Amino acid sequence: MADLFEEPDDATPLTPEERLALIPSDITYRRELNRAEQENIARAQDWAFSRRRDLLTEKFIKDLHGRMLGEVWRWAGDFRTTERNIGIPFYQIPIALRELLDDVKAWIEYKTYPPDEIAVRLHHRLVHIHPFPNGNGRHSRLMADLLIMQFDGERFTWGSANLQDAGEVRKRYIESLKAADNHDLGPLLAFARS
């Protein structure tokens, strides 16, 4: 994609104000933006996997997003303040996130679901809430990876492909999210381990 802000049809577009929050001034093409974001995310992964952390807090969720995209976007780590084509109304984000974190803690304490399912449910609900202007899928997948590793499980493979690129794997991912929206978590669980 040549246009810096051109997104796949199923991606969440940034508002004009959010686009102005791009930090590097030398980025002019989408591939350069993708590369800058991926380099920032790689550093955030190193930080996140460096030691055990209390994942299930609003502070950690915001800190992780900030570390993932903070060298690229000024809004990184801040909840969105505008409506999107996906996600709940922005003013409900803090309450919905608190409910999700309480649910996940209860699922763990009472062993409501197997570890993979708890982590994938966390991922799905974070995507549904869509707390940030962008990067929600990447953030929620990393959160699920961190949680499953705290269960001493293996990281998820998430289709073994770059989900930023349009293609068959991204299509399967979106379809599995839609199935989970309709209370069928099976496809998303399978995709996470594919």
Image (cartoon, helix red, strand yellow):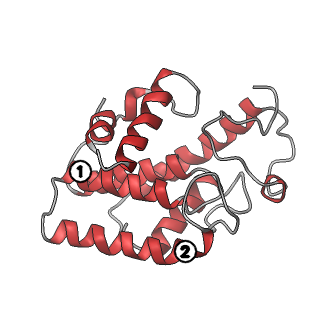
Of labels 2 and 1, earlier in sequence is: 2
Q: Which residue is mark 1?
A: 117
* 10 Å crowding of disc 2: few (<14), some (14-19), many (20+): few
| Position in image of residue 138 (x %, y %) | 51, 46
Q: Amino acid at mark 1?
A: Glu
* Farthest-out residue, front: 182
Q: Residue at image x 58%, y 26%? A: 166
Rendered position, 149 above or below 58: above
Q: Is residue 194 above or below residue 65?
A: above
- Residue 52, image x and y in percent? 32, 63
Give 180 or 54, whichever is nearer the viewer: 180
Residue 162 vs residue 184: left or right?
Answer: right
Image quadrant in which the C terminus is located = top left
> Farthest residue toward the top?
168
Q: Which residue is mark 2?
A: 92
| Nearest the eye: 43 or 97 | 97
Query: Is residue 47 something that shows in the picture?
Result: no
